[in-house]
Image (spheres, rainbow, N blue to C red):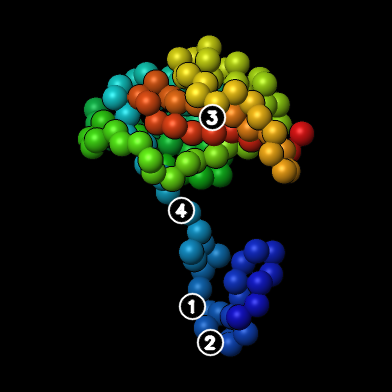
Amino acid sequence: MTLTNNVAISTQPEEALLMSESNLRIDYIEFVVRNMERAKKFYGAVFGWTFTDYGPDYCSFNDGRLDGGLTTQGELTGGGPLVVFFADKLEDVENSVVKNGGRVTKEIFSFPGGRRFHFTDPSGNELAVWSDV
């Protein structure tokens, strides 16, 4: 198997035919939220997500590249994987997070390769945003 453009490609022709481009990539992510309308307003305003409702307890979202879902069914738990967004203008996104009801939990800090901050959405889910400038 070889790595081309960060996609594993089999050197065996019959194996290559069986693997899709999406193989082993994050395909969908769900967030448990306390209030569906507030969550949609927050993510729509801050990140420009669009939504499709599937009843009062579930909606899907699209960020232009990745699909996911928001659900009011389930427990909000901390300590899971950290979802990290990319932003060209980090300070603008930080201001938008606060303006739209999020709470910054780690102010902007530098790390090798860029800068980022952490925040919680109105339901308490912790996320982060980074920039390479």
Q: Amino acid at mark 3?
A: His
**Residue 13 against residue 26 in the figure, above or below:** below
Q: In this rendering, which labeled residue sits more in front, label 4 or label 2?
A: 4
Between marks 3 and 1, how big is the CA–CA gap?
Answer: 39 Å
Q: Amino acid at mark 2?
A: Glu
Between marks 1 and 2, how big is the CA–CA gap?
Answer: 7 Å
Q: In this rendering, which labeled residue sits more in front, label 3 or label 1?
A: 3
Q: In this rendering, which labeled residue sits more in front, label 4 or label 3?
A: 3
Between marks 4 and 1, how big is the CA–CA gap?
Answer: 18 Å
**Can residue 39 be seen in the rendering of this structure?**
no
**Which of disc 2 and disc 3 is earlier in sequence?**
2
Between marks 4 and 3, how big is the CA–CA gap?
Answer: 23 Å
Residue 14 badge: 2
Q: Are the residues at dot 4 and dot 2 in contact (C-beta closer than 8 Å)? A: no
Q: Residues within 10 Å of mark 1 (few under 14, many from 20)?
A: few
Q: Is residue 33 left or right of residue 20?
A: left
Q: Quick one: SS at disc 3?
A: strand
Q: Amino acid at mark 1?
A: Leu
Q: Residue at point 50% right, 24% down?
A: 105
What residue is disc 4 on? 27
